[in-house]
Amino acid sequence: MRALHDLKRVLVAIPLILFAGCDQLTDSSNDNAFAGTEWEAGTNLTAEYGGYEFTPEKPAFDDPAFAQIDAEETAVQVESMDLASLRDAIVLRIQWGQLRGNPAQEQVTDWSGRMAITSGGIAVLRTIAFEAPRDHLLPRENRQVVGFVSHTQPHFDGLLLAIHPGDAAEISFGMETGPYTHRWSLEELRGIQTVIPVDDLGNAVAIEAIPFDPACPNGFVRGHWVQRDATRGVFRALWATELGRVVGTLRGHFGVNDAGEHVWFAKIISDDGRVLGLARGQWVPSDTELPGGTFAGHWVAENRELGGAVRGHYLPIRSDTRSTGGFLSGKWHTDCDSPDPAVP
């Protein structure tokens, strides 16, 4: 299929040696960048894709907030990897701290600890919002353990890891820190996607994993979920490969339609503004102690020969501040065996 071949060429032809960049921890942008904009005025909750069309856009929708989101992650220098060494790997994105952002938080939380696997190895692909030199990776003593120093206050830190399972009959992966410690079996880890409340300060851990699959493009989405009120809002996110390379952006809106359904719609563009796809789905508020919820849906390319699924978690902007954009984190994949996916 030509469309799938082209997408593989764009998304999978990524550098296999990752280079270090500058660590930056930036405030999420003020959601005023979304308020009263022309694009939002043209959206709705009734059209097939909420008013979005397959028309080109300016790169990153001409929204500077995408650059701020992108700056949160820093590639780490790792050993050269070939596709064969990654074929059975699980790529894990794990974040901890004030996921929603809390500028009023005065207490520093020390998350220093380690990630460890009982068999196999771990490669660090990216640090997330580490503030050097205070936050840093520790020297590696072996390939099964990643030690780090991490402190959070108004924001969060995290890591993007490639986990290579070993040959042991039973394998587990663990996060070991002062605020939170847990161990998952390899099977639990393969499809994990969850947000875990940690303490009364509002700290939480977000963790999600996807298999590395060069034959079928997939990856992560990360950005802001901006809730206008209890029933509507907008969101922005980066569209990245499973190894963290950003290849596009998406922008969308959500709300409750006349039928009482919690629906969302989005437009996905490449780094030069070409439309990769349109998306739609449903969002479900959480009934747990942690505010926010989940979203899930499908995306489809213009020729309908290519599409896939996207899903994740969101945490709304804090009600006591307007300086952060809320939290959105998820994953996407291509329906390689079903070129014309059923769209909910």
Image (tube, helix red, strand yellow):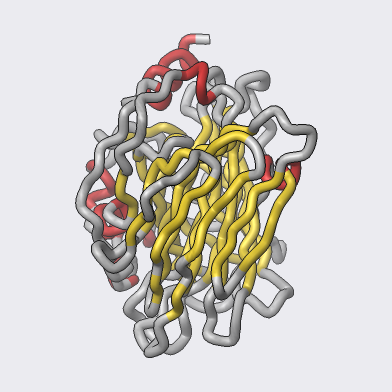
The image shows residue 251 at horizontal and vertical percentages of 40, 51
Query: Residue 125 at what x, y percent from top left?
Result: 40, 41
Q: Of all residues shown, which one is farthest toward the top?
A: 1
Asked whether 235 or 106 is in front, the reply is: 106
> Residue at coordinates 66% horizontally, 69% vertically from top-left?
285
The quarter holding residue 132 reads: bottom left
Q: Is 226 situated left or right of 134 in this image?
A: right
Q: Quadrant of the C terminus?
A: top right
Whether 273 is drawn above or below 195: the answer is above
Q: Is residue 1 above or below residue 26?
A: above
Taking depth in this image into account, of 157 and 295 the one nearest to the observer is 157
Query: Is residue 257 among the parts visible in the rendering?
Result: no
Tell me if residue 3 can be seen.
yes
Q: Residue at x 49, y 60 (%)?
A: 95
Q: Residue at x 47, y 19 (%)?
A: 83
Asked if residue 310 is positioned above or below residue 81 in the image, the reply reads below
Q: Nearer the viewer, residue 108 or 190?
A: 108
Quadrant position of residue 24: bottom left
In the image, what residue occupies the spot 31% across and 43% down? 75
The tally of labels here is 0
Question: What x and y, as percent, mark residue 335?
Answer: 62, 26
Q: Name the spot of residue 313 as percent of width and height, x first.
A: 58, 59
- When the figure is inspected, residue 53 is found, relative to residue 115, above or below; the finding is above
Q: Is residue 282 left or right of residue 205?
A: right
Instruction: Give 1 or 332, whichever is nearer the viewer.
Output: 332
Most extreme residue toward the front, as rendered? Answer: 141
